[in-house]
Each structure stands twice: as structure tokens, then as C-alpha cells.
Amino acid sequence: QVQLAESGGGLVQAGGSLRLSCAASENTFNRYAMGWFRQAPGKEREFVAHISQWSGSTFYAASVEGRFTISRDNTGKTLYLQMNSLKPEDTAVYYCAAYSYGVRLYNRVSSYDYWGQGTQVTVSS
């Protein structure tokens, strides 16, 4: 069972950048498909980005495509989310998540078995 811990959140002005990290506890990190989700106050948790475990294929929500980049360092057991051109509507708690087997819908909260505790990102206008 993998444990996940996010870091890198904070307060940034609109147009700025942040890089989130998600450290995994498992040495078999490369076997996990990984995703980033976010949840704003009063809203449901929503998909942000996904990276597969074998090919490293990436997928993004339309709202972040071209501004955010998901990547992974399997040796360092770390997932990243580079966020550029941030907007106030990107303000949310950001969560990393993982699953290790099966063909699943990568943009669904219910597809992921393991979650981090979240890190707050606040973008001021």
C-alpha cells in the first residue's frame, strides 16, 4: 500500500508559477498510474492531470491544458505538477492519487485507490 505526501503549495499572484511534488513511499512506484486532482471550496474534487505507469502517457483537463505539466521520477519515487500562467480559478487544495492495476477511467476520482493529504494553492488576482 503506497503512501503519498504532497508539497509545494502556497500563495502566488496570477500569472505566476508553482511546482507541486508528491513523494511516494513504495519502491514499486513505477507500477502506479498517478493523477493530480483539485478541490475548491464548495465544489467537487475534479481531475487535473494523469500520467500512466508504463508508457508515461499524459492526459490533462481542458482547463489546464497547455499551462500545467505532469511528470514523474520513478527513481526518486516522486510525482510532479508544474503549474504556469496560474489563474485565480486554479485556487484549490491539490491532491495526488494512485492506482496500481486494471484499466480504469483516469479522470474519475473513484478510479484511484490511494490519496495524499493535499496541499493548498492560492492564486491572487
Image (cartoon, grey):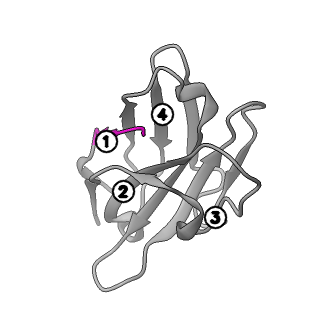
Q: Which residue is mark 3?
A: 107
Between residues 86 and 37, which one lies in front from this camera angle? 37
> Which label sits on residue 6?
1
Query: Seen in the image, is 91 located left or right of residue 26?
Result: left
Q: Residue at x 28, y 79 (%)?
A: 41
Vertical side of 121 occupied by 74: above or below: above
Residues at marks 2 and 1 touching, judged by CB atoms closer than 8 Å: yes
Mark 3 Cα shell of 10 Å, populated few (<14), some (14-19), many (≥20): some
How far from the left and from the top, in percent, is residue 57?
Answer: 75, 39
Q: Residue furthest top?
A: 75
Point out the tag, 2 or 1, that comes first from the N-terminus.
Answer: 1
Q: How far apart are the two marked residues, 1 and 3, measured between alpha carbons?
A: 19 Å
Label 2 sits on what residue type?
Tyr
Q: How far apart are the two marked residues, 3 and 2, measured between alpha carbons?
A: 14 Å
How far from the left and from the top, in percent, is residue 1?
Answer: 42, 40
Label 1 sits on what residue type?
Glu
Label 4 sits on what residue type?
Leu
Q: Residue at x 54, y 58 (%)?
A: 112
Secondary structure under tag 4 reads strand
Vertical side of 27 occupied by 80: above or below: below
Q: Which residue is mark 4?
A: 79
Residue extent of the magenta highlight: 1-8
Between residues 79 and 17, which one lies in front from this camera angle? 79
Q: How far apart are the two marked residues, 3 and 4, measured between alpha carbons?
A: 17 Å
Q: How far apart are the two marked residues, 2 and 4, measured between alpha carbons?
A: 13 Å
Secondary structure under tag 3 reads loop
Q: Is residue 7 magenta?
A: yes
Q: Quadrant of residue 21?
A: top left
Q: Residue furthest bottom?
A: 42
